[in-house]
Image (cartoon, grey):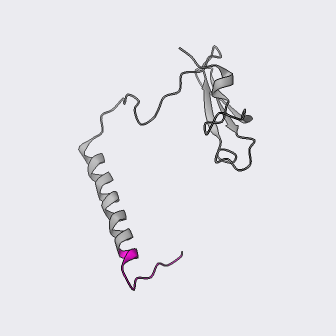
Amino acid sequence: MSTSWDEASRCPRDGQYQGKVVKRAPQREGGQLITLECPETNCEYHTSGWIVQTRADGSIPDKIDPRTRERRFAPTPMAHARRRAVLDALEEQVASEQRAGSEVKQF
């Protein structure tokens, strides 16, 4: 299966606008990574853009949701422990900022 260029080049936000190609990066296998930006100025993809991958034959792989895609490597227990530590630290920071009399410094 592959995706059509018309579908892949549409803005990921709502698909209303056709993206403008701003960069092409050739890949070793013969394909390209094409960076597009939304022409709508109030869109989040206007400045950040999105990337479309093409294969050597010009076809475009189907879109894969990064949250549900198959992983090559299983997450290690250390990865879970580090994630939990970061989330705990963030919760502690939010709690301390919301305490009465606390001061939040702008750096």
Of residues 59 and 95, which is closer to you in this image?
95
Q: Would residue 97 be counted in the magenta stretch?
A: yes
- Looking at the image, which residue is at 74% across and 44% down? 40
- Residue 4 location in percent, x, y? 64, 19
Determine which quarter of the picture holds residue 7. Answer: top right
- Residue 6 location in percent, x, y? 69, 23
Report how many numbered discs are placed on residues in the image: 0
Above or below: residue 2 compared with residue 91: above
Describe residue 5's horizontal placement relative to residue 63 as left or right.
right
Above or below: residue 82 compared with residue 9: below
- Looking at the image, which residue is at 34% across and 64% down? 91
Q: Quadrant of the C terminus?
A: bottom right
Determine which quarter of the picture holds residue 3. Answer: top right
Of residues 19 and 70, which is closer to you in this image?
19
Describe residue 77's horizontal placement relative to residue 5 as left or right.
left
Describe residue 38's horizontal placement relative to residue 80 as left or right.
right
Q: Would residue 50 be counted in the magenta stretch?
A: no
Of residues 58 and 90, which is closer to you in this image?
90
Residue extending furthest toward the left: 77
- Residue 30 location in percent, x, y? 62, 20
- Looking at the image, which residue is at 75% across and 41% down? 39
Describe residue 100's horizontal placement relative to residue 61 as left or right.
left
- Residue 51 location in percent, x, y? 62, 34
Span colored in magenta:
96-107
Determine which quarter of the picture holds residue 94. Answer: bottom left
Q: Is the magenta region chiefly helix, strand or loop? A: loop
